[in-house]
Amino acid sequence: MSYLAPTEFVTKMVDAGESKVFMSTRDTLIRAYMAGALLALAAVFAVMVTQQTGYPIIGAMLFPVGFCMLYLLGFDLLTGVFVLAPLALIDRRKGVTLRGVLRNWGLVFTGNFAGAFTVAVMMAIVFTVGFSTEPNAVGKAISGIGEARTLGYKEYGAAGMLTLFVRGVLCNWMVSTGVVGAMISNTVGGKVTAMWMPIMLFFAMTFEHSVVNMFLFPSAMLMGGNFSVMDYIVWNEIPTVVGNMLGGITFTGLTLYATHLKTAPKLVPAARERELHAEPLRASTSSAA
């Protein structure tokens, strides 16, 4: 079958979460490193297309190519393991502990950041001809994004922090739906289609993705972006990570798990309920006769 029923793909989600918790440190880091690098390249591609065409929606329509590549290759994003690993804990899979889930998250974060930062350095070299010239148009656009999405939030204080957090929640609601999309179908075309739609939506609406930001902000700083490392950490990465975590597990993981694997008892129609009440009465009448 090219399409799996919800009970089937949610079971695959729990199985995947269990597998990731028990994965070796080496494999977890390699897969996370490659995921961060590929997503960073996709972000560069999207910004470049937007610069060339003047239409951000075209960049958003093409950005999911990186997400699809990395998941078809079996690599892992932090936003994905935020959803999958806790499900194995919630399902009480043997040997899965909170410590194991946190270990997986920490390793994937480290690998994602290393991969994204590698691409940030490489692309900064490309955009500045080995740091010998001013950044080209794409480099300047990335620097502008870095400033707008750190100092822009900082300007509004608590309201800016709340907005950043909510954008992080909304982001991983969509991105984690894309992660689930990779499990909905058994065909490459089906997987790509299911992944493409929510990823395009999140990018087009400029929600905050922790791994994309691991590329954008270091890259912006390397090319002269007018903000500090602490601005990046406090006014983007930390609130985004927390928002991504809560958005993914709450709106995608728990909802799918609760309604497709741990379903509530079905309601009994009123007519059938009357019949069930009447059956003991008929039985007692018959025995009395």
Image (cartoon, grey):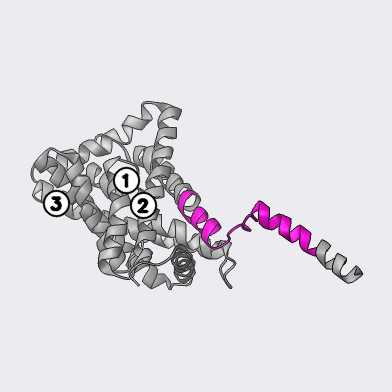
- The label nearer to you, 3 versus 1, is 1
Marks 2 and 1, Cα distance to the nearest angstrom? 7 Å
Q: Are marks 2 and 1 in contact (CB under 8 Å)?
A: yes
In the rendering, which numbered label is found on residue 202?
Answer: 1
Q: Nearer the viewer, residue 260 or 127?
A: 260
Marks 3 and 2, Cα distance to the nearest angstrom? 30 Å
Kind of residue at disc 3: Ile
Kind of residue at disc 1: Phe
Residue at the image point whose x is 32% and y is 30% from the top: 152
**Sooner in the amino-acid sequence: mark 3 or mark 2:** 3
Q: Which residue is mark 2?
A: 175
Q: Which residue is mark 3?
A: 125
**Sooner in the amino-acid sequence: mark 3 or mark 1:** 3
**Sooner in the amino-acid sequence: mark 2 or mark 1:** 2
Residue at the image point whose x is 36% and y is 67% from the top: 3
Instruction: Kindly give the residue lying farthest to the front in the view shown.
Output: 289
Magenta-highlighted residues: 251-280
Kind of residue at disc 2: Val
